[in-house]
Each structure stands twice: as C-alpha cells, then as structure tokens.
Image (cartoon, grey):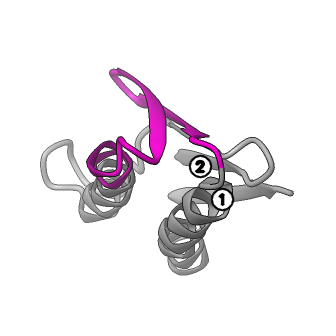
Amino acid sequence: MIRARYGRRSLSLELRGHAASAPRGEDLVCAAASVLAFTAAEALRDESERFYPRIVTRPGELRIACEPASGSRRACRRLLDTIWIGFELLARDYPACVSAEKED
C-alpha cells in the first residue's frame, strides 16, 4: 500500500510503499501516484526563485518539503493542495492500494 501524507502546515509531502495492484512495472495505481509526486517535485524546482524544495528519494519513498521564499507560502500551499487532490482521488478510488492522510 502507498501511504501518502501531506503536512499542510509544514508544506511537506511524503510517500512510502507500493500500491501492489499489479506486478511491478505494470501497476497503474503506483504509476499515477508517482506521476503526482514527481509533478509536485518538478513544479517546485521550476519555481526555484520562489520555493526552495528539499526532495529526498529512496526506493519506495519520496519526501518533499517546500521552503518558500518570503511571501510565497500561499503559492507553495496552493501547488501542494492541487497535487494533494490527486492523492485523495486515488485513495478514494483504490482504498486497498492508497491511503491519504492530511495534517492541517
């Protein structure tokens, strides 16, 4: 199971695990979660003048923390909020494969 956690106050996103809905390399749920996570990471990198992302990847784990420049906290939260909607949808549609926990 993929465990996704969004720290809204801390502006962090953490993923652990594997969806296990199909064999590795064929798992569409895992692919969807990966695309969401890597989209968040790349979007934060692209805005490097406003955000200072810390991104840690390991097999089966991705952690992203957004450290906004002065005045950019709301924009960082808006970006992560948007990505988080995708994780909530995955958890709703594939509850055996994805859990999504948001900390306010």
Quarter of the picture holding the C terminus: bottom right
Q: What residue occupies the far left of the structure in this picture?
A: 25
Q: Is residue 48 left or right of residue 65?
A: left
Q: For residue 49: magenta?
A: yes
Q: Where is residue 21 in the image (x, y as percent from the top left)?
A: 35, 58
Q: What element carries label 2?
A: strand
Circle 2 residue = 4
Q: Is residue 47 left or right of residue 78?
A: left
Measure how far apart labels 2 and 1 are at the Cα level.
5 Å
Task: Categorize mark 2 by other alpha carbons within 10 Å: few (<14), some (14-19), many (20+).
Answer: many
In the picture shown, does residue 35 fall above or below 48? below
Locate residue 67: give its quadrant.
top right
Circle 1 residue = 100
The amino acid pointed to by label 1 is Ala
Q: Residue at x 57, y 41 (%)?
A: 69
Q: Is mark 1 on a helix, strand or loop?
A: strand
Q: Which residue is drawn at 45% across and 34% down?
A: 53
The amino acid pointed to by label 2 is Ala
In the picture shown, does residue 91 fall above or below 60? below
Q: Where is residue 60 in the image (x, y as percent from the top left)?
A: 39, 28
Q: For residue 48: magenta?
A: yes
- Mark 2 or 1 closer to N-term? 2
Q: What stretch is highlighted in magenta?
A: 41-70
Q: How many labels does the image show?
A: 2
Task: Categorize mark 1 by other alpha carbons within 10 Å: few (<14), some (14-19), many (20+).
Answer: many
Q: In this view, does 18 lie to the left or right of 74?
A: left
Q: In this view, does 96 lie to the left or right of 25?
A: right
Q: Which of the labelled discs sits on residue 70, or is there none?
A: none
Q: What residue occupies the far right of the structure in this picture?
A: 104
Locate residue 88: give its quadrant.
bottom right
Q: Where is residue 58 in the image (x, y as percent from the top left)?
A: 36, 19
Q: Which residue is drawn at 63% across and 61% down?
A: 77
